[in-house]
Image (tube, grey):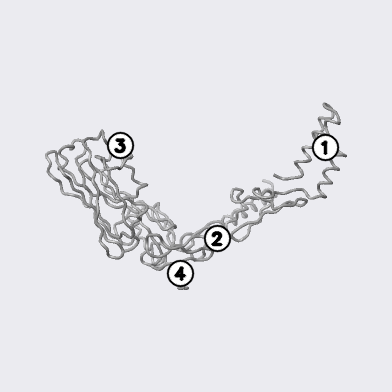
Amino acid sequence: MDPKEYLVLLAAALIWMVISAETSQATHLPGCRDKCGDVSIPYPFGTSKDCYFNEFFRITCDTKVTPPIPYLWSSNLKVLSISLDGHMRILTYVGADCYSKNGVREPPIKAFAVLSAFPFSNTRNKFFGIGCDTIAYIDGIDIHGQRYRTGCMSLCSDIVSVTNGSCNGIGCCQIPIPENLLNYNATVGSFRNHTGIWESNPCGFAFLADAESFNFTIANLTNIKDTTLLPSSIDWAIGNQKCEEAKKDLTGYACKANSYCYDSSNAPGYLCNCSAGYIGNPYHPDGCQDVDECKDSNLNRCLKKCHNTNGNYTCSCPEGYHGDGRKDGEGCSADQLLLVKIVVDIILKPTFVHLRCIHSLGIASCAELALPAMLRALHLN
């Protein structure tokens, strides 16, 4: 390879490395694990001391298995995902109530979960009952110590009357859960011990689940017996103060540079989000980083020239043009001096605009074809 070509390639590689380093966004603290198995662990969560905001954000990573499995705190609740918008998906148990062909009840399986913080999401979860001879109950306690109890019935004379995707009380029932629910027990009962429907539905089931993760099918009347865990969602937040109070604590306030605070809608406490024009982890000590909208034409509305600013960008026109330089604004129009130059060039040198037309159509026709070219030059669009 030619030495000059080598130097050019080396320079390009160095520039790419610098750009990559500037645009990469840190989500975890230095020296801390950023993943446990396939699950990303963004700060304020962490797996070891000094890597999480406080004990409520501690994730236990079981590295004795392959791949490693993350658990919330020291519980048996497996973590599926953590998002910085205040949601976490975990696995929770399915309760079952099964019978033999002659109606003898098998030992029931209870579904329960106990959280020391971060309530179950009342917007993402539903309580489900599955079966053709089923009554499902849920008993719970909210963050204020208030008790909660409700349930739903699911009945059907045969599976022909059951519809895939429909949870309207025929084979499947569902109800919303209240706000701030921390702990719950789900139990299942039967009216006739499934004796009239045993061949196609020997069991009833009850569970709390993320409504987007569970879609009822007729097959659930039997095959859900082999499912012991289903995804559910919990809402996490920082502390138990609202933004107005939290901002007064200059040392403990979690929202870092270029971010803003907003109150959690379910969990007590607050959340942080990057300000407009910034990206990254708003809880990370480095805060959110500026988005360079000029590097991606999909992020700006500039016609020709884009200038990045902190949290925003501006547009301008090339030399010889005026306007706001925006595709959704005035655009760029030719200045008067440039207009005169273009007209003179076209009059004196028409063949420069459309040379072939002289030989085929004549000079008069050439001027007619040159005019649209001149008009296009007057305005950039």
| Residue ID for mark 2 | 289
Foreground of the two, 23 or 289: 289
| Residue ID for mark 1 | 352
Q: Which mark, by number, is residue 163?
A: 3
Q: Secondary structure at mark 3?
A: loop
Identify the image quadrant of residue 353. Answer: top right
Give the amino acid at mark 4: Glu
Say if 145 sits above or below 130 in the image.
below
Identify the image quadrant of residue 15. Answer: bottom right
Q: Residues within 10 Å of mark 1 (few under 14, many from 20)?
A: few
Mark found first going from the N terminus, 1 or 3 = 3
| Residue ID for mark 4 | 244
Residue situated furthest right in the rendering: 348
Q: Secondary structure at mark 2?
A: strand
Q: Nearer the viewer, mark 4 or mark 2?
A: 4
Give the amino acid at mark 1: Phe
